[in-house]
Image (spheres, grey):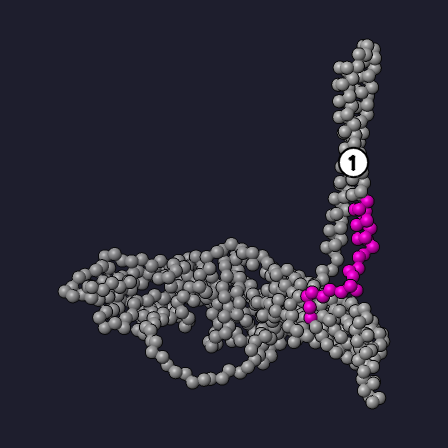
Amino acid sequence: MIKKQATALLLLLGIFAFAQKPIFTTAKVKAATVYFNAAEISQTASTTLPLGTSEIVIKNVAVNLNESSIQIGTPASVTVLSVQFTNNYISEYETDPKSPLLKRVRDSIILVQKEILKVNNTINSESKTIQLLDKNQQISGVNSGLNVAELMKMVEYYKSKQIEIANNINTLTEKKQKLDETLQKLNNKLEVDTSKEEKTSSGKLIVQVMNSVAGPVPLEISYLTNNASWSPFYDLRTESVAAPINMMYKAQVVQNTGIDWKKVKLTLSSGYPNQNNQAPILSSWFLANQLNDQVITTSAYGISKRNQIQRSIYKDKKVSNEMEMAAPVMAESSVSNYTTVAENQLNISFDIDIPYDILSNGKIHSVSLKEIKLPATYKYYAVPKVENDAFLLAEIADYSKYNLLRGEANIIFEGMYVGKTFIEPNQTSDTLNLSMGRDKKVSIKREKVADKSGTKFLSAKKEQTFTFDITVRNNKKEAVELLLKDQYPLTTNKDIEVELLQSDSAKVNVETGILTWQLQLKPNETKKFRISYRVKYPKDQTLNL
């Protein structure tokens, strides 16, 4: 019986305590671990708690967070009973403190507005007095029956009175103008001072706690939010084909959590914390009768032709907005000293020792991670059938040790921005191929030879011959290596015949129809190659050749 009474008493005490005034505190961001699709935010707060149960309202947390990820760290004397997140907390006890300086500014604005109203009223009264004088002067002058002397005296009176009132209006107008200027300055000061106040979020945590020792209590808060992300970005710089690539490893961080991260300890991780962690299970696989013919064209590096073009062609040679935004916030030579790279079982993380400001504005914030010198082997690559330009390729051996992640890269070659490329380290090859952009100093031309091309009509078939001359020239001062590629068509249709007539010492892959030349071009050297092929097919068919 005594135990039940004690339990009931505790419940009553709890209800009484929770009915008391909530205790408010504001959380500050201490650190953030940003993932590709989320961020774990660590915040701190402090408050003073009485003995027993209390309700703490922690202000300034993210506007959108995963409630199941919330963790509240407290001293051993404090027990957390429950945690609730809300964006719509309304309480008669919650008040926003106003600084004395802002209060003085607002009070001054009210006084100036009252003074402006008085001046406006006086100007309005003086204007109506002038109107009344004018009206009375006209009536008196017509109907007064006064002699000339009296009339002149009346005119002088009206004249002096009108001048006096007009001067008063001018003085009042000048006073109003000065008051308007003062009001504008006060409003501007209010806006500036308000902007200097720390931005707080509408997100709040309502925490019910029980405290065994009254006094100050520190709080450690952490949670996951989806309103933040980062993506890798690179600057690739090289001065010549004899020099290594200077790679600046960067991150583009975006957050819209509702709270500004000021001077935070930043960690970037390649993980996905909100991924489905259930291991996949295979079910039986039954084939349906839905077979379709497919045509696959393979490039030199095992990627589709469409992807090859998308990842190789960068025509814009102007410095883009992204290039300007990617400028490092510190001297690049010292970046690596402040970043620790940790390669875990499932992801890579970058711990940055320099505190960063990442504002909650949805804009890209550039963070410099580390500088890497990549030993590279250079060669040129050209497919004149697709593009009449030579692309500089850099081959990076044993690239896995650099912890690269897939992402865009700016290319700065010989001191000039030449465009963008894409780094794709998730491949099975031991060598990473980077497209370093076009080089106009290696000229390529592919022309159809008219007198060696044409169409013949046979008894039942149509015969077409195609001949092309490919001319390459090295206009550089140093020798270059060029990988040149072209192709001829293939067919699996027994009614269509394809015959390669001339390939000029190219290496021919009969399974893909790709012709390859490995060329060494001396300075100012020109080489010419000819390819020719014949296609025979029924007259009643049309081929896209």
SS for callout 1: helix
Q: x%, y% of residue 129?
A: 79, 27
Q: Of 226 and 379, which appears nearest the observer? A: 226
Type of amino acid under label 1: Asn
Q: Is residue 49 left or right of residue 338?
A: right
Q: x%, y% of residue 99?
A: 81, 56
Q: Give the range drawn in magenta.
A: 85-111
Magenta-span inclusion, residue 98: yes
Q: Is residue 365 left or right of residue 125?
A: left
Magenta-span inclusion, residue 51: no
Q: Of 43 and 6, which appears nearest the observer? A: 6
Q: How many marks do you count on the picture?
A: 1
Q: Of 98 and 357, which appears nearest the observer? A: 98
Q: x%, y% of residue 264?
A: 70, 67
The quarter of the picture where the N terminus appears is bottom right
The quarter of the picture where the C terminus appears is bottom left
Q: In this view, does 153 lie to the left or right of 83?
A: right
Q: Which residue is drawn at 76% across and 18% down?
A: 139
Q: Label 1: which residue?
A: 121
Q: Which residue is drawn at 37% across and 61% down?
A: 386
Q: Residue at x 76, y 53 (%)?
A: 193
Residue 507 seen from this side: no
Residue 157 seen from this side: yes
Q: Give the answer, above or below, for where 179 lies relative to 331.
A: above
Tag 1: Cα neighbours inside 10 Å, few (<14), some, or many (≥20)? few
Q: x%, y% of residue 479?
A: 43, 63
Q: Which residue is drawn at 74% across and 60% down?
A: 198
As drawn, the residue found furthest toward the left would be 459
Q: In which quarter of the image is residue 492?
A: bottom left
